[in-house]
Image: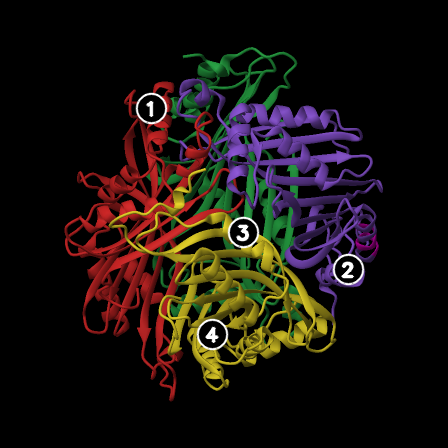
Chain colours: A purple, B red, C yellow, D green
Amino acid sequence: MIDIQSQRIEDGLPIDKVGIKNLKYPIIVKDKYSVSQNSVATINLYVSLPREFRGTHMSRFLEVIQEVGLKKINRRHIRSLLLRIKDVLDAKAAHIEIHFPYFINRKAPVSGAEGLMEYDCALFGIHDDEDRFRLTLEVGANVMTLCPCSKSLSPESGAHNQRSRVNVRIQSGPLIWIEDIVDIIESCASSPIYTLLKRVDEKYVMEHAYRNPRFVEDMVRLVAEELKCTDGIHWFSVESEHFESIHNHNAYAFLECGDRDLEDQ
Amino acid sequence: MIDIQSQRIEDGLPIDKVGIKNLKYPIIVKDKYSVSQNSVATINLYVSLPREFRGTHMSRFLEVIQEVGLKKINRRHIRSLLLRIKDVLDAKAAHIEIHFPYFINRKAPVSGAEGLMEYDCALFGIHDDEDRFRLTLEVGANVMTLCPCSKSLSPESGAHNQRSRVNVRIQSGPLIWIEDIVDIIESCASSPIYTLLKRVDEKYVMEHAYRNPRFVEDMVRLVAEELKCTDGIHWFSVESEHFESIHNHNAYAFLECGDRDLEDQ
Amino acid sequence: MIDIQSQRIEDGLPIDKVGIKNLKYPIIVKDKYSVSQNSVATINLYVSLPREFRGTHMSRFLEVIQEVGLKKINRRHIRSLLLRIKDVLDAKAAHIEIHFPYFINRKAPVSGAEGLMEYDCALFGIHDDEDRFRLTLEVGANVMTLCPCSKSLSPESGAHNQRSRVNVRIQSGPLIWIEDIVDIIESCASSPIYTLLKRVDEKYVMEHAYRNPRFVEDMVRLVAEELKCTDGIHWFSVESEHFESIHNHNAYAFLECGDRDLEDQ
Amino acid sequence: MIDIQSQRIEDGLPIDKVGIKNLKYPIIVKDKYSVSQNSVATINLYVSLPREFRGTHMSRFLEVIQEVGLKKINRRHIRSLLLRIKDVLDAKAAHIEIHFPYFINRKAPVSGAEGLMEYDCALFGIHDDEDRFRLTLEVGANVMTLCPCSKSLSPESGAHNQRSRVNVRIQSGPLIWIEDIVDIIESCASSPIYTLLKRVDEKYVMEHAYRNPRFVEDMVRLVAEELKCTDGIHWFSVESEHFESIHNHNAYAFLECGDRDLEDQ
């Protein structure tokens, strides 16, 4: 059989990323307390392709995943996987994106009733053509926000509030746990949200939120200030999107801070 | 060229629906005030297929759409299109589903500032094997709801409120306008929501919502009671989904009332 | 604290379904070979509400899930959960919908190389007001289909083929395994699809598909005929959607067969 | 009423983007032949916020849209809108993102039968803090691709082919029409795809695709080479995603070329 992918071509353009996209795969992640957590990931895995080759070998991406497995998702494991991909595909750079739901057990603020909260996380890894490795962690958490302007306008009727989504991306030297980013996001909101709330909790949550109103601008700034004070983070971005209860569209803010290690992430 | 689709087969099962799905097409709808509104629809168009034929002729669905056009979406036009489909494809029954965004100009409650609100609408048409025609209209509107329980718990801190989605489906004798269904949905909510609100409006909306708290159960019942009193509606369903500001999951209610004309819609 | 939900109301309409929607939760499912599989589910859980009560108690849905857990998803477990929900909420009927990705290890047809394939599954349970329990299983599998018409038109250029999605829903007396439904769907397609294929496999798959062309009508009929011959299935539906490589829209077919036990599923 | 948004704060972080997201709005775009086309857009509109202000004024984004309108979407109009936003909100930089479906009438290659094809387009405009304006156009088109490797493996059984999605983004001096980008994308594919094909066309399309097999790498390189030869384009990116008929995951490639004018797009 002819290996068409390996054909030499002339005057081709180099390709930044080529590989597989939207692969669903079961994974295991270790949480902050060393407990293993099963999840289901959506995975993209790419390499760079030099100008002189016609194509990459798609099946080898799957062979490497099958061989290396995704049973211990952490910094070391992702680096090994990217190195193996570079080796097997004879590539200068390799990229991986792993999106997965992550669960943390949360206690309601008064009753202490427990419930699992879901957070949308992602890991973006790159091993570049100068053999540098960089990992970016993304954590998405839903929170409650209450509008400061509305509070000042209608003191006897409360204020409009809503579910909001906050996404944080960080690049750090040492490992930062998902749990720590979630704690930062939730502590900056008008209130965290919960899976299970009894009425005493619901009362507490509402009163707490009323005392802590947050614009979309407040949300990104407060989270950013916490991230700036967290040791080891040298770059981060924060975005917040409020699904406002009084509008059909959303309020949105984004800010970025620090130096990204590698450009193309 | 052999016409494989027309091959006779033996012992085949009759197929309830076969045709094209997820076709994007520009349409024109006339609003309540006879103004034409351009929109972009997502269209599914099916026929039934008797047991003795191997296949239908997919290209003819498109030929009929191309010939009849979708520039005047109304009851009469949809019936003609289904009759034409039945004729061209020699089918016993024909089904169409047309999903489209629809815009209504709304004035803010105090300032009168205007803004376009978007509603997700759909028309489901069937012309069945006994030559009966039935049209179902779906209207989806986002509204604001404020929790009665939360209001009673935290009288000095307001109450949790959120964006909610209400979907109504109706079957009626005479035509019911989208605008009329939207008016019913919005009048039953804690408050309508708006594209453009100035601060005097925001104050009004919040105070209005606080005086009109709504559980998800209240929403579907109030809308249902209005629909029951509307002349000409002989079947309807109402669903309401509240994207609760204190939870990661949603509150949901559904009720159905009256007699559906034709079973398989 | 006043229990507003328990307020008696007059002239209310009964509500078919009220509860929680879009809850993400980790689950464990046992596969055909008694191996436990971790997955992440999206869950809806509803009860019926009689006309005389204003509201249900949303937090109790979560308490029951927290108490009963979702670590052994099977027929018996779902029935217990629904009975518990009916009991705790004093409801006449209870409904659950559990959507989850499910993985099966598949061997490539020639090389035997292994790879995990993902299938989108769902369980729909109802415990109704006459104490009848009914479970519906849904299995969604992607397959390859090759067009018989195209094959006859261009004998020297192959035929257009594409990824297609087949969804099966069944109601059965005894348990039918997800693996068995997947086997039926894949055996009826032009070819199963795979996560990992080497070149010898890719050659085999293409030649197999070319010998087994399938219209969208063929797909639903072939699957239906297999389901009809499967002991214990008394109702099923099959739909197939082909993301045709020559069009921007999809080809679609649906058929339903047998008697549904309970109406409102 | 107190204007909380205008409150001065100390030590705040500057915010890169704050504004409204996911606003649905009807728009009018002029096509290459000066015919006006109605569409429905999804719009994001942001400004930068300096460190000393607590918040922006969300309602003014809508006032500007209401005042300026979106009835003539083109380069000049978008610049005016951004300038007006900067002025009204006293902002240093403004960003707009307009996503919309766009239709082009296409003739089948042999029969000449006409049908409307839908393309997903977007315009990204920025007016930055040095008063520079930059517009990026995105065009997404679905095409047919046929695998060169598969063709070589199974000469008598054709080759696997599938629907693929190609997205191009360009920055150019003079205006480049959507139609021209679509022509480039479609001419580089194994074959364009169509809304309406008769059997003579289907035969032609299949034979054309068979003679023009394309890897995902071929697709992005061929499109890139055409874009490089197009006068006035100084930066572009191309991505191609093949929904492969033999796999559950997709093949993907991305390349970028030239100098971006402004960094933060």
Q: Amino acid at mark 2?
A: Gly
Q: CA distance from mark 1 to mark 2?
A: 57 Å
The residue that label 2 is drawn on is A69
- Label 4: few (<14), some or many (≥20) within 10 Å? many
**Does mark 3 fall on the same chain as mark 1?**
no
The residue that label 3 is drawn on is C62
Q: Would you say B131 lies left or right of A133 here?
A: left
Task: State whether residue B127 is above or below residue A172.
Answer: below
Q: Amino acid at mark 1?
A: Tyr
**Residue at x 37%, y 30% (from the top left corner):** B210
Q: Would you say B121 lies left or right of D176 here?
A: left
**Does mark 2 fall on the same chain as mark 4?**
no
Question: How far across and down, in percent of the image, does residue C67 sit?
Answer: 59, 56
Quadrant housing the C terminus of chain A: top right
Q: In which chain is the residue bearing label 1?
A: B
- Label 3: few (<14), some or many (≥20) within 10 Å? many
Q: Is residue A83 magenta?
A: yes
Quadrant housing the N terminus of chain A: bottom right
- Mark nearer the viewer, 3 or 2: 3
Q: CA distance from mark 3 to mark 4?
A: 28 Å
The residue that label 1 is drawn on is B204
Q: Residue A253's quadrant in the figure?
A: top right
Q: Is residue B121 visible?
A: no
Label 3 vs 4, first from the N-terminus: 3
| Number of residue marks | 4
Q: Which mark is residue B219?
A: none
- Mark nearer the viewer, 4 or 2: 4
The residue that label 4 is drawn on is C170
Q: Is residue D182 visible?
A: yes
